[in-house]
Image (tube, helix red, strand yellow):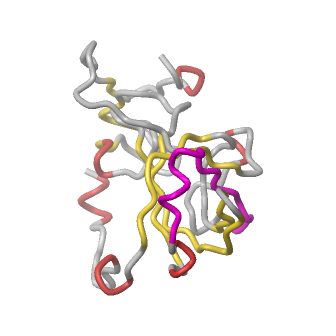
Amino acid sequence: MAGDEFGVRPGEVVADLPERFDAGLHFIGRLRTPWTDRADCPKNNLQAQAPCTVEIDPPYAPGLRNITGCTHLILLYWMDRATRGLLVQQPRHADSPRGTFSLRSPARPNPIALAVVELLGQEDDTLKVRGLDCLDGTPLLDIKPYYASTDSRPDAQVDRAGVDR
């Protein structure tokens, strides 16, 4: 299983994943970042200030038309080296295990991650962005424009007490 090198910590629960997948995906490109080791990778995209490159595979390049009209993008990517199937995790920063769906960890049944990134520029089939928090070579699933008018939720909160249960 991909991601086994990251291991399962004491107190964590792993799902028995089905043998067959429910859906198929096409990677549309790769993310190029300065990080090749998990220990060096930022823990979230607000900590990630290094410029990174989004490489789009040629068949998908026409989808970049008008992309420079956006200042920010939502990138969905596949954390291909993450442990699959974790349902309960023991984060290093927490004093007790937490349910996977209350965390932003890449270790989950479907290791899909997202980042809101700043678009710095475009050159042919590549984008320069700031705000990625993944390892170099991570597969890209999709790109969506970030609309502050509909995507921002300034009143959103996370009840830390509820999350710690």
- Residue 155 in the image: state x and y as whole percent: 28, 84
Q: Quadrant of residue 22?
A: top left
Pick the residue in front: 23 or 99: 23
Please give left or right for residue 54 compared with residue 152 in the image. right
Q: Residue at x 53, y 25 (%)?
A: 3
Pick the residue in front: 116 or 85: 116
Q: Quadrant of residue 138?
A: top right
Please give left or right for residue 39 compared with residue 59 in the image. right
Does 124 sit above or below residue 37?
below
Task: Return the residue found at the far right.
Answer: 34
Query: Does 62 lie within the magenta span?
Result: yes
Does 74 sit above or below residue 76?
below
Q: Quadrant of residue 87?
A: top left
**How many marks can you see?**
0
Residue stretch rendered in magenta on the structure: 49-65
Q: Residue at x 29, y 74 (%)?
A: 157
Query: Does 73 lie within the magenta span?
Result: no
Q: Residue at x 70, y 59 (%)?
A: 52
Q: Is residue 4 visible?
A: yes
- Residue 93 in the image: state x and y as whole percent: 51, 51
Pick the residue in front: 5 or 65: 65
Pick the residue in front: 158 or 113: 113
- Residue 54 in the image: state x and y as whole percent: 63, 55
Does 6 sit above or below residue 128?
above
Q: Residue at x 64, y 51 (%)?
A: 55
- Residue 18 in the image: state x and y as whole percent: 24, 17
Please give left or right for residue 106 compared with residue 14 in the image. right
Q: Is residue 108 visible?
A: no
Does 117 sit above or below residue 10?
below
